[in-house]
Image: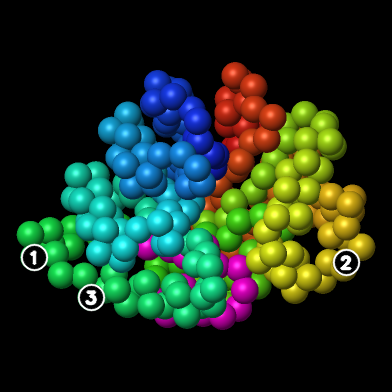
Amino acid sequence: MSVGIWRFFDGAPITELRETAAEVEELGFDAIWFGEYAGREAFTQAGLLLAATSKLTVATGVARFDQRSPLAAEGAIRALGEAYPGRFIAGLGGHRPGARPLTALREYLDGMDAAELPGLPQPSPRPRRVLAALGPKLLDLAAERTDGAHPYFVPPEHTASARERLGPDKYLAVEQAVVLDDSPSVAREHVDLYVRQAPHHQVNLRRLGFTEEDLADGGSDRLVDAVVATGEPAVADRIRAHLDAGADHVCVQVLARTPDSYRRLADLLP
């Protein structure tokens, strides 16, 4: 059972970032993933987390390709892979205004593969490169051009279809939002954010069989229950469901965190 922590660090001081990374490592989680939205540059922040730990895997979930050139991304990935062998995963994703995601990401990967960095050879082992892929075409691109996929805001049913699309040998790391205590309002607020502001998640949910009624008014009970696990028994069951569906790794985003949240989560795992 490979389980990690997923979170945003936007606005968090560096001391909190370092303390969180050390706690996650001490509790025995396999990795820490973080999103890039309005905070520190993703690869710089990955370096801070890696420096604060000794064995924890650090993963960008995701580094936004629209925020840096392919050359800059490839150079940063190689540098982190050289400095911290086997401990860094480069999750890539994002949206470029006016561009089709599939075309934009394919061109970006082309640019990374063509990057000329004679003073910075590819490290060994080469860091994993995964895509924030939801739909079948992006999952196909992930299987064709990268080491796997990092789906976000998905139920286990998506994990099963993603595994089938990727094939048996690609790495599949799935984000799962949870609320450790029984607090339906917290779960609904999280779902409401994505069904209102993230069209690509709306498209993916429709693809999974959710209706317009499910997406209305902050999300139906059925939708909220599908994408957020609420209560400790449900959290443990949901992690297992993703793994049984074909995930190699589940990175858990704890909503409404408290100082003991990660320890409580660790206690749920065998």
From the viewer's perspective, is 165 left or right of 202?
A: left
Residue displayed at 37% across by 72% down:
108
Circle 2 residue: 212
From the viewer's perspective, is 185 left or right of 45?
A: right
Residue 44, how many percent across, how many down?
Answer: 32, 42
Q: Tell me the kind of residue under disc 3.
A: Ala
Circle 3 residue: 114
Q: Quadrant of residue 263?
A: top right
Q: Is residue 233 above or below residue 159?
A: above
Q: Is residue 86 above or below residue 206?
A: above
Residue 94, how many percent across, how many down?
Answer: 50, 61
Magenta stretch, residue numbers = 128-145
From the viewer's perspective, is 210 left or right of 198?
A: right
Residue ranking furthest to the front:
98
Any magenta on residue 138?
yes
Q: Tell me the kind of residue under disc 1.
A: Pro
